[in-house]
Every structure is written in C-alpha cells, then in structure tokens.
Amino acid sequence: MGEPEKKGRKRDAQATKARILNAAKKEFAKHGLGGARVDEIAERADANKRMLYHYFGSKEDLFRTVLEEAYLDIRSAERKLNLESLSPSDALESLVRFTWKYYLKNPEFITLVNSENLHRARHIKSLTSLQDSTRGLVDMVESILKRGQETGEFRAGIDATQLNITIAAIGYYYLTNRFTGSFLFQRNMMDEQALEERLNFNVESILRIVQAP
Amino acid sequence: MGEPEKKGRKRDAQATKARILNAAKKEFAKHGLGGARVDEIAERADANKRMLYHYFGSKEDLFRTVLEEAYLDIRSAERKLNLESLSPSDALESLVRFTWKYYLKNPEFITLVNSENLHRARHIKSLTSLQDSTRGLVDMVESILKRGQETGEFRAGIDATQLNITIAAIGYYYLTNRFTGSFLFQRNMMDEQALEERLNFNVESILRIVQAP
DNA sequence: AATTTTATGCACTAACTAGTTACTTCTTTA
DNA sequence: TAAAGAAGTAACTAGTTAGTGCATAAAATT
C-alpha cells in the first residue's frame, strides 16, 4: 500500500523521467536498440508514451541517455575502488574482481555496449564526457603498472590500454556468451562454482601477464 | 557479360539457396536478428522473398541455418591448422593468431554470435553437431596442454575450456567493441599497427598464462 | 508427349511501430 | 485567486514488416 498508485500519484517530473530511463535500460538490454519497443518502455515505466517523447525526444535519444548513464556509472564505481592505496598486485587483483562482479550484477551494461557497437558507436559519439572518464581509468591502471615496475613486481613495457582491454575482455566475453557457451561446452557457465573458477582463472591470468620473470 | 543475368539465369536451387544464405549472413550480421529485414535479404540475394520462405521456412529458421554454417566453418578451419605437428608453445601461438585472423576476416561471425546470445542461444539449441565440433576444439587444446606439461614448457592444472575461452575473449572483445573502444580510448583500434600490437600482446599473454615458472 | 515435381514471381494482408495531435489536469506563482 | 506553464492521457497516422495465396514456368519423370 506504500507504493505510489498511478491515480493518486503526485506529479513528479524527475521521478517519471527516472522510471522511463530505468524501464528503457531494461528493454534496450533485453532486445537491443532495434528490438526494443517504445510502447513497452512506456508501459513498464508506468508512464505515457507521450511523456517519453517529451523528455527524451526520440527512441534513439533515449538510447543515448541510457548508454551515457551506464558508462558513467561503471566509471564512477571504479574510481571508488581507491586502488592507489593498495599494493600494485592487490590493486590489479581488485580491479579484475570488481570488473567481473560489476558485469555480473549489471548484465544490462554488456548488452547495451554490444548493441551500441552493432550501431558503430554512433550514439555515444557526441558524449565527450565518456572519453574523459575512460581516460581516468586508463590513467589509474597506468599508475598501478608504474608502481609495480618500481617495486619490481611487474615487468616493464606493458601498455595500460591493452591491459585494460584484456581485463574487461576475459570477464565480458565469458558473460556475454554464456548462453551459446553453456550449450556448446555442455557446462552451466553460470552456476556458482563455475563463476568462482572463472574469476580465479582471470585473476591468475592477469597477474601472470604482468609479473616480472 | 559473363555474369548470370536474372532473366537468362538457369534454374538452380542450390545456387539460389546459397545466394540467400550469403545475403542473410550479411544482413543478420549488420543489423542483428531483430533489425534484419527479410525483404532486404531477398533483394540482395537477387531472389524472391517467396523463395526464401520456400527454402528456409521462416526468418528465424534462416537465422539458425546461418549460425550453424558460421560455427561449422570456424571449427572446420581450426581443425585444418594441424596443431598436433607443432611444439606445444608454437601450437598455442598458432591458435591465438589463427583465431584473431579468423575474426578479423569474418567479422560477421562475431555479430552473429552476439545476436544469438541476445536471444539466449535459443536457435542453436537443436544443433547438437555444434556441440560435437566444439568438443573437438577443446580436446585439441587439452592435448596441447598435456604435451606442454610433459615437456616442462607449461605448468600443470590449466583447464582447457578456460584457456579456450580466454583465447577467444582477448580477440573477440577487442574486435566486437572496436567502435566504442576507438571512441572512448581515442585511438583507432583498427589501423594496421594497432592490430599488430594487439595480436602480439595477446600471443604474449596466452604464453605467459601457461608457461611453467 | 504427358504428367508430376520443383522453382519463381507478384500482389496482398494483418499486425505492428515510431512518432504526433489535440486535449485535460494539476501545480506554481504573480 | 487567476493565469501560465508543466505534467499527463487517449486516440490516431503513416509507414513497415513477416508471412501467404495463387498462378506460372521450367525441369524431371513417366
């Protein structure tokens, strides 16, 4: 009864906008940009389609906003890890574990990124804020690598962007292809033990890649 | 003038089927299952839509056939590598390089797999032949790992499926996300030098993951 | 040559979809 | 409290889309 009923609900632009955005994220993640239905988004947001167009302009503009929020959210969460305060190895391990868990808890992120790449990244092209926060992530890894070289833990000459891509890749690929993978490999890639094994394999892989001989 | 004109073309079921399949692969890869247009496929195949339904039953059945062919093709190409005749390290390096080049030359493969995973792998679920050929690939890697342990090149306890997934991941992720990546990292991920650097990074990564201390 | 089977083409439909028009209701503030 | 503006709704439109009915043409078979 504490839930706001549609009839009795007070007018609240912010809240309506947020509901639409949230419903859109789910719908776009589930069906991709092409497969998503504007009517479905409006209905699931418990809002009117006219409101959706009022606040977001078009289906594609809505998609752009959803993408922007998704990217800003993961980059913001990464910054909160405070990797500077950890040893280089621990910092890298933390990042691998965080990335994995973020993908696991936010499976929409992966599908949204896939969809945006199907459309050749044309929606985010105008969002330079995303470039800045990405630069921040690369800098963070670069500084970890530098510290690791200084302590002698890590070898020299590792490209921070390449390592970043690899850290994302080994989690992302496993999870985005979990449906075909579970069928083809004939093992349930999503049961608890399988997930734990994969994460451990990934942590070990990244550390082996950077470790000094 | 040597090209078969639509009017004068002799009837050839096999050829028509193949043209439709080829056009479908391109269309599905470009727009995903949901975004692909049946009319467009028929037109690009220089065939009639009626033929498409005659041979393939439905859009989804056509998609299934395209997927099956794509998977069988990569698995078949992998088998031809003859990795058994190489040293364990060389075999693994060959597999990494081959996988990368296959994705690069067949970008539709990646998009098709992404699309199938968006649909929770429901189309390939009936195709047990794909499970068999996947099993073959895992066995191949397993045998390389075993040989490597025997020669002392590789450490023990590496899971062949995990390694397989990682080999695919580090190439696949880079290429499927090349559009968002090029924008976010502000570097052209597809220029010749970038591709070469990535491939070298990947070969080195895989070898470091398996190498004995 | 007659008959059957397979390949091809056009025109149609029923359902769906992004976006809009025209309107009402609530909230704020001059 | 009256007016202005913001929030919300229902019904509609114009264009698409997957899939089909039906007729015909070319091979294959008898």
Image (spheres, coloured by chain):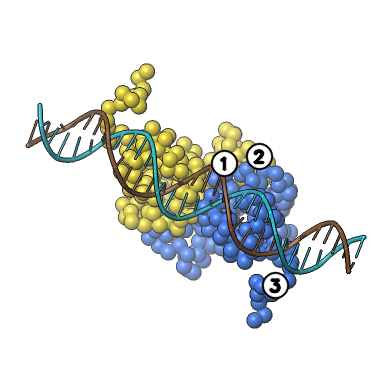
Chain colours: A yellow, B blue, C brown, D cyan
- As drawn, the residue found furthest toward the bottom would be B1
Mark closer to the observer (3, 2) = 3
Q: Residues within 10 Å of mark 3 (few under 14, many from 20)?
A: few
On the image, numbered disc 3 is attached to which residue? B9
On the image, numbered disc 1 is attached to which residue? A198
Q: Is residue A92 visible?
A: yes
The image shows residue C8, relative to residue B121, as above or below, that is below
Q: Choose the circle earlier in sequence order: 2 or 1.
A: 2
Mark closer to the observer (1, 3) = 3
Looking at the picture, tell me which residue is in the foreground, A176 or B204.
Answer: A176
Amino acid on which the number 2 mark rests in the picture: Arg
Real-space Cα separation, disc 2 to disc 1, in angstroms: 13 Å
Q: Secondary structure at mark 1?
A: helix
Q: Position of residue B209 (x, y in %)?
A: 57, 51
Left or right position of D12 against D26: left
Looking at the picture, tell me which residue is in the foreground, B124 or B133.
Answer: B124
**Label ID, residue A187:** 2
Q: Is residue A211 visible?
A: no
Amino acid on which the number 3 mark rests in the picture: Arg
Q: Secondary structure at mark 3?
A: loop
Q: Same chain for the residues at labels 3 and 2, yes or no?
A: no
Q: Assign the N terminus of chain B to one quadrant of the image.
A: bottom right
Q: Same chain for the residues at labels 1 and 3, yes or no?
A: no
Q: Position of residue B55 (x, y in %)?
A: 70, 56
Real-space Cα separation, disc 3 to disc 2, in angstroms: 48 Å
Labels 1 & 3 near each other (Cβ < 8 A): no
Looking at the picture, tell me which residue is in the foreground, A36 or B137.
Answer: A36
Real-space Cα separation, disc 1 to disc 3, in angstroms: 54 Å
